[in-house]
Amino acid sequence: MDMDRTIHEQVVEDLYAEALMLADDARAAFDLRDEASRGNSPDNVRIALSVEGLRTTTRVMHVLAWLLNQRAYQSGELSKTQLRRHGTLGAERPSDPANMELLEPATRMLIRETERLHARVARLDEEMRAQDENGSEAVSAMQDRIAQAFGRG
């Protein structure tokens, strides 16, 4: 069990480092001040950049919030109950294919990277919640057997 926790901690740290890099890349890619100052992009491109920028930064912030909650739990700042209650991953809002066609290849690639990161964290979150549910069911079953053994069931 201790080894599982160590592996989980390392996975969280690796994902956290990746999310921080993607957050910085997203900030640079979607800095609309530079785009607006050039003023040479059509309105539909600026709108696509704005919409996908918001989706991308929201996606990365949801991942970072989830990872920060995991780190807080690992360091003892959150209980298991608090983590279950407040440590949910925000819903994915996939990019719009029509908007993606208007964006530069590097920007599309960055968006896809954030979508892949969110999907990886979502799988990890689902696995952890399934393990918690299985563990809770096992504990409940054991408590029921103990209660029956002592004539309280």
Image: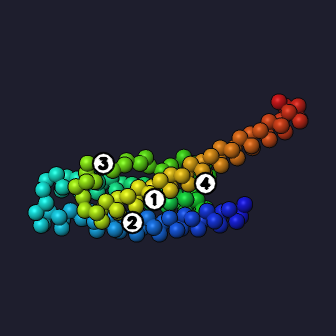
Marks 1 and 3 sit apart, C-alpha to C-alpha, by: 17 Å
- Marks 3 and 1: in contact by CB < 8 Å? no
* Number of numbered tags placed on the structure image: 4
- Marks 1 and 2: in contact by CB < 8 Å? yes
Identify the residue at horizontal 56%, vertical 54% (top origin).
124
- Marks 1 and 4: in contact by CB < 8 Å? no
In the image, residue 2 lies at what x, y percent?
71, 64
Rate crowding at label 3 as few (under 14), some (14 to 19) or many (20 or more) other CA atoms within 10 Å: few
Q: Which mark is residue 79?
A: 4
Rate crowding at label 4 as few (under 14), some (14 to 19) or many (20 or more) other CA atoms within 10 Å: few
Marks 2 and 4 sit apart, C-alpha to C-alpha, by: 29 Å
Residue that carries the numbered disc 2 in the rendered image: 22
Relative placement, left or right, of 45 versus 89 is: left
Earlier sequence position, callout 1 versus callout 3 = 3
Q: Amino acid at mark 4?
A: Ser
Residue that carries the numbered disc 3 in the rendered image: 96
Identify the residue at horizontal 17%, vertical 64% (top origin).
35
